[in-house]
Amino acid sequence: MQAPLPAGTRASQARKVARDETGGTRASAVGLAVDLELARGEIRMLRQERDRLKEVVRRNLGQEPDKAGTGDLTTRVNELLTSNQRLEDELAKVTIAHDDLKQSLDAATEEVATVRMAMTQIMRDANR
């Protein structure tokens, strides 16, 4: 059980509350409501500014590659075009070589077939 407060202490606390209310050190409900509404308005403005700045940063980041990377991109495109042309030339050469080898294979296959037929005929003639 708590010890009872001295009578003078309660009176002192009551005087402090009255002094605070008359001295303006305690905020009134109306004052707090006004402060709250002002804070909400400031928060709205700050959010709008944040959104606007985010949009500016997003737009600027989108333009950076256009400005900063144009030279690098042009160089890379030229490298790719050169490489593509080299590969097309190489493909044309390989295609010609492939066609030549196919013709050689067809000729060799025909020759082998002719030799087989001749060999078969020679074997038949020898067996008669």
Image: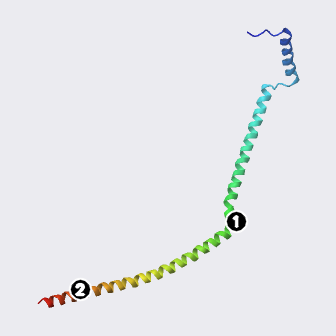
Q: Secondary structure at mark 2?
A: helix
Q: Residue at x 85, y 25 (%)?
A: 25
Residue that numbered label 1 is attached to: 68
Expressed as whole percent of the image width and height from the top left, the position of residue 107 reads 32, 86
Q: Amino acid at mark 1?
A: Ala
Q: Which mark is residue 116?
A: 2
Look at the image and tell me in which quarter the C terminus lies: bottom left
Figure quadrant of residue 100: bottom left
Residue 59 in the image: above or below residue 107: above
In this view of the protein, which residue sits in the foreground, 45 or 125? Answer: 125
Q: Is residue 28 or residue 14 the one in the foreground?
A: 14
| Label 2 – label 1 distance at C-alpha | 72 Å
Q: Secondary structure at mark 1?
A: helix
Image coordinates of residue 9 in percent, x first then y, are 85, 12
Instruction: Give the quadrant of residue 10.
Output: top right
User: In the rendered image, which quarter contains the N terminus?
Assistant: top right
Q: Residue 7, located in which quarter of the rendered image?
A: top right
Q: Which mark is residue 120?
A: none
